[in-house]
Image: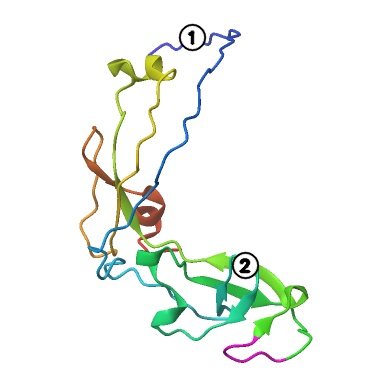
Amino acid sequence: MVTEEKSGTFTCELVATPVEREEIGVITDTCVNALNGAEPVINGELIPIELDNNGVVTYSDKGDSWYNYCEQKWANAVILVDNPSKTYNVGDTIRESDIESYFVWIPRYRYKLFHTNQADGYENKLSESIAQEIEIEFENRDTPVSNGTRDGEWLTHPAFTNFDVNGM
């Protein structure tokens, strides 16, 4: 087999008009056992926290109130600096200066593909609103991997299958 290397310069311009949406990612009452076995894992130096909208970090316990993916309340955690200013207990507000790192649990998921074939004229629709909700479903590593390649098919995100994990 003979290969030939070619080079060239291309210029392109992407023109799109953003359109404000009324709602995004509405989660319905069908959100029961949403994580399907891909619940967060806390170990080592990680401390479960609740992070308020105003930035206040509260030490949480690992109970059910710590996170709720149905209500978009994510499983957040921190690692404290080597010598925090004090010892913290559940319910305490953690000082920013005592936090070394922030983490959030990303559960294993699959998503429904759309616009997989650029030949369908998708690239010519940039002047009109093409906003589309991305459908996802959480799954655990015992769920058969979804290997979709076309519109309407499901694809398990490769980050989870490459490492065979329930989340990161």
Question: Relative to residue 159, is residue 130 depicted above or below?
Answer: above
Magenta-drawn stretch, dominant element (helix, strand or loop): loop
Image location of residue 29, percent across then percent down:
25, 64
Image location of residue 19, percent across then percent down:
47, 30
> Which corner quadrant of the image does residue 130 belong to?
top left
Can residue 45 be seen in the rendering of this structure? Answer: no
Image location of residue 142, percent across then percent down:
24, 65
Q: Residues within 10 Å of mark 1 (few under 14, many from 20)?
A: few
- Disc 1 element: loop
Q: Residue at x 56, y 14 (%)?
A: 13
Question: Relative to residue 124, is residue 45 depicted above or below?
Answer: below
Residue on which the image places disc 1: 4
Q: Which residues are magenta?
A: 87-92
- Disc 2 element: strand
Q: Residue at x 59, y 65 (%)?
A: 53
Q: Nearer the viewer, residue 24 or 69?
A: 24
Name the amino acid, label 1: Glu
Residue on which the image places disc 2: 102
Name the amino acid, label 2: Tyr
> Which corner quadrant of the image does residue 69 belong to?
bottom left
Queried whether the magenta region covers residue 89, the answer comes back as yes
> Which corner quadrant of the image does residue 11 belong to?
top right
Can residue 48 be seen in the rendering of this structure? Answer: yes
Question: Relative to residue 16, is residue 8 depicted above or below?
Answer: above
The earlier-in-sequence mark between 1 and 2 is 1
